[in-house]
Image (spheres, grey):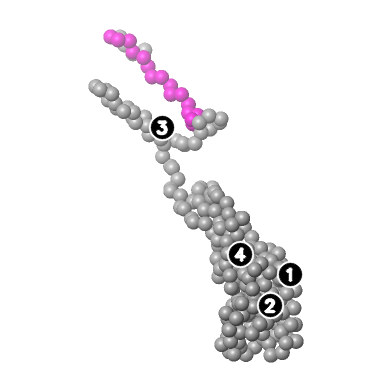
Amino acid sequence: MIHEVDEAIRRMLVAAGVPGGGGELSFDAPTKDWAARRNAPTVNVFLYDIREDVMRRHAGGVESYDDEGVLIGWRGPARWFELAYLVTAWTNRPQDEHRLLSEVLACLVRVERMADEWLTGTLAELGLGVILNSAQPPDGRATSEMWSALGGELKPSIDLKVIAPLAGEWTKAGPPVTEGVVLETAAQSGERSRRLRYEGPTTADGDGFAVTRPKPVPGPRRRRGGAIR
């Protein structure tokens, strides 16, 4: 799921023309070594935190059917996670960095929900949507401490939060029932067991629980010691 969110962010920025003019888009950690190897204007989108959104947790699964309406399996409930990204711009001059970061900010604040064409894999299959929150008030995660851990100098950045679903476990259904119902009764002492077979559908018609079937036509009756009538 995480790599699918990365791809959705990449498609969103590319669709907005960010970064333009031969710039690059990177998801690497912006360390000193990475910054030294950079040789073009770059927008860096660094994933630094993953937390579950427990308020969105729920029970129950979803049934899945094929094109003919046959049940093929069940998908367990999705779990929602908040992915936190640090978005920065890297150029040779602060003015250019601010201009590039402004383009990124303009793109992010216009999007509150990822477009369907940006989603791939399980994110597209689930159809539950991916939510974006950009440049929101801090929630206790100190940016300065993060830069210290990366070993780099403090830079202006945009805090991007992406709330996305993680697909639940898939359970495959067994093959559909195509035969009738067979009932066997236990035999009592001295009696033969009875075996009843009902051909045809096993689902009920109408309001009852049993399938409506035509009554069999009784055969000819024969009196004891007499001819068949």
Asked if the residues shown at circle 1 and circle 3 are in contact, with their CB atoms under 8 angstroms apart, the answer is no
Question: In this rendering, is residue 162 above or below 105?
Answer: above
Q: Which residue is drawn at 57% across and 79% down?
A: 149
Q: Are marks 2 and 1 in contact (CB under 8 Å)?
A: no
Q: How far across and down, in percent of the image, does residue 77 sit? A: 54, 53
Observer-side mark, 4 or 3, equals: 4
Does residue 124 appear anywhere in the picture? no
Among numbered discs 2 and 4, the one appearing first in the sequence: 4
Q: Report the predominant secondary structure element of the magenta stretch.
A: loop
Identify the mark nearer the N-term, 1 or 3.
Answer: 1
Pointer 4 residue = 82
Residue 144 visible to an observer of this rendering: yes
Looking at the image, is 134 positioned above or below residue 125? below
Q: For the residue marked with disc 4, what is the amino acid?
A: Glu
* Residue identified by numbered label 3: 198
Give the mark, 2 or 1, whose residue is nearer the N terminus. 1
Kindly report which numbered mark, 3 or 2, lies closer to the viewer in this rendering: 2
Quadrant for the N terminus in the image: bottom right
Which tag, 4 or 3, sits closer to the chain's start? 4
Q: Distance between the residues labelled 4 and 3?
A: 54 Å
The amino acid sitting under disc 3 is Tyr
Q: In terms of depth relative to the viewer, which is nearer, 25 or 121?
A: 25
Q: Is residue 12 magenta?
A: no
Hey, what amino acid is under mark 1? Val
Q: Of the numbered discs in the image, which one, if any, rests on residue 109?
A: 1
